Image (tube, rainbow, N blue to C red):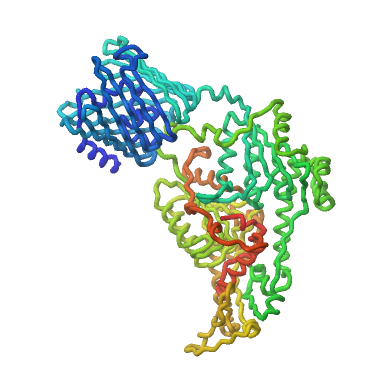
Amino acid sequence: MKILKGLLLIIIGFSSQYSEGSSFYERNHLLLASPGAMGIGLYGLDNPALLAYLHQPDLALMWTDRTGDWNDFNEWHLFFAIPYIGFSLNQKKVAGNSFKGYNLSVALGNKAQDLGIGYEWNDRNESIWKIGSLTRPNRFLSIGMLGTFSNSHPERELYIDLGLRPVGNNRITLFADCAIQKGTRLKESPYSTGLVLEPLPGIRLSGRFFNDRSFTAGINLSFGRFGTINQLHFDSEQKYQYNTYGIRIGAYDRNIFKPLIDNRKNYLEMELNGTIVYQRYLLFDKNPSLLSLIKTIELAKKEPGINGIAINLSGLNINWELCWELREKLKDFKSSGKHIVAYIDEADILTYYLASVTDKIVLDPEGGLNLQGLLMGRMYFKNALDKIGIGVDEWRYFKYKSAAEVLSREKMSDADREQRQALLDDFYNMIKKDICASRAYTDEEFDQLINNETYLLPAKALEKNLVDKLGRWEEVKEMVKVIEGKDKRFVKTSYFSSVQVPFDEYWGEKHKIAIIYGIGECAMDTGIKARNLVKDIEWATDRKDIRAIVFRVDSPGGDPLASDIVAEALKKCKKKKPVIVSQGSVAGSGGYWLSMYGEPIVSSPFTITGSIGVIGVWLYNKEFKEKLGFSTDFVKAGEHADLGFGVTYPFIGTLPDRNLTDEEKKKMEISIKTLYCKFVEKVAQSRNKEPKRIEEIAQGRVWSGLRGKEIGLVDTIGSLETAIIIAKEKAGLKKDAEVTIIELPKPQLFSPEILQPRVVMTNSNYQKYMDYLKFLIEHNGDVLLLMPEEDILMSGWHYLK
């Protein structure tokens, strides 16, 4: 309201009517209603602030027959506008004389508060500056104001219009407006009242009554990107005077024929031949994001003209957790009675798991199904490090904390084998349950398929009822025809009318929910980039228009400091607004530290979570330096000053000359166990459990999301969309309330990999192994909240940005 009062003072202070014949009310014969009550008014000629509600370029021609016949164009206006900028040209012929006028307007702001400035001039050397504002604090109320500053006339005028939508949408709009003039008593100021009805999308009926007892009645018909306007004018004695006409082309508007034209005969075509990411780079990135896919499928579910989805899964690059989320969304789509057909070629068990949710699967005749089952293996470096002369001291005091085993052992410890087998068993059973339900298999038949068939050629896959037809992508249309009984048109997401609807359909800003991503290793300046992430959290916390925060965690942990400063920022945020944590592929160790203050914590069955434990590793020189011919020497002041001193190597960094002494090891043990106790206590406090209970499920053990739910580390099994729905409810909104999603951190311009040379004959898994080892070396001797590298690779962390 302070902003509104300030704008009112500015407009009153600088407004003046520049010509009695050209006041605002002179232009009312072109308007079906007051400017703020319907559409975008006159493209900035009336109130420039309305241009902020234009969503696409638009062109309109309007004319009247009050100075002649309807087709002699003695008075016409041509309007052209793009979002935030409008231009108009008008001509009027009176007694053989022709007068031209021009207007240029610009706007800025958002859907809740807009400002606009316009400049109007004519061929009589008259000009006027206009200042306008539009305030829509919610979907029910609109307040517009306009003032002018003339170069030739001192009269002042302030125009105010109010709009009211009783049911909060465009079905019914009531309005009133008034022109307040200097030297005129308020009760004598001209005003009007009226209403706009939109009984069906694209059909708008208006009635407007003026204080002199004159009135107008109009109709606006919209056919998508084309529309017509017709308005009848009656004088103060209710006698017909003249008509106003208009045609519009350009911006998409609601279409009165769309339900009849569509008749649910379209299939949405989705190409998923890429990597599913959380956030796309702004440039040179065609990968689909998880949120965009969820939104697209939801739109297809609600769109009357969409009867199904055809999905091309050739070349899909996805991890288990994201695959499950996408599969669950497709299952939800099917619950609406619509159909899905999928195309696959060379499909592994992950791709097939996703495809199995569809009604029909088309397999390429030269493709196949590779159903080998699941495996989680590790590569161990101990012998290699021994041979080159690098020593490893693993500081492991907790049974399952196996992050450094690859450096200190030749094979899995019993504890690590136990937890990994449990993970795979949970994943396998989930896959089996879902595929069996979709393809009418029994558990025994599925096990036999995995253990005995393994790789199935197309004919065998068809015989085993794993697919429904052999063919290329074109064959999908034939399969759709079989399902629907007739041909269906394939359309892209641009088809959705709901994507293109004018902003005027919803007044004001929608409620906002922030999705903040904590992706990658927990570090201050890489991975989650904790320094910047905390600022994003604080920004979202302080914004009153953001009703809740969904914190998406996909992190294997790392630096305790980075984990804790982010977790504390979320804890402070929770005092002001709901904070819901959505766990992605990996949310263990430092990743669980990030999660623990969420209320609730939402996890998928395929999430790897828990790993409440602490570890450290010390790499040092045994003979490596000597084998390379290096030597070192030093002087020192302080008994432990040489700890960490050694040769610095390319790619490796500094390799200390010696191991820790017994005394130094004891200090590290105290540090690690102290941090572990703090970790357990924090989790117990945040989960409202006794530390003893957390200790029983801690010791560095990783759990699947399903097991995490059973033991109390997770509250709800669900997806990112589940977390968003919970955020709405906790913010006091309805489950199906429309909200604006704000994603943080803001996406980068382009991937840094574009500027980096690629090493020949390398793959992403190898690169991630190297990155993992590099991280351990860079944090040599640090106390870490870190998970094993194989948990990261198994979860598909390398698919995340």
What is the x, y in percent for residue 556?
Answer: 59, 62
Q: Is residue 424 above or below residue 502?
A: below
Residues 249 and 306: in front is 249
Q: Is residue 171 above or below residue 639?
A: above
Question: In which quadrant of the rendered view does residue 313 lie?
Answer: top right
What is the x, y in percent for residue 616?
Answer: 59, 73
Q: Quadrant of the C terminus?
A: bottom right
Looking at the image, residue 156 sits to the left or right of residue 218; the answer is left
What is the x, y in percent for residue 299?
Answer: 56, 36
Residues 50 and 629: in front is 629
What is the x, y in percent for residue 335?
Answer: 65, 35
Residues 15 and 535: in front is 15
Q: Is residue 142 above or below residue 619?
A: above
Q: Quadrant of the N terminus?
A: top left
Q: Is residue 307 above or below residue 635?
A: above
Question: In which quadrant of the rendered view does residue 312 lie?
Answer: top right
| Residue 595 can be seen in this image | no
At x 60%, y 49%, the residue is 276
Looking at the image, residue 456 sits to the left or right of residue 5; the answer is right
At x 36%, y 30%, the residue is 43
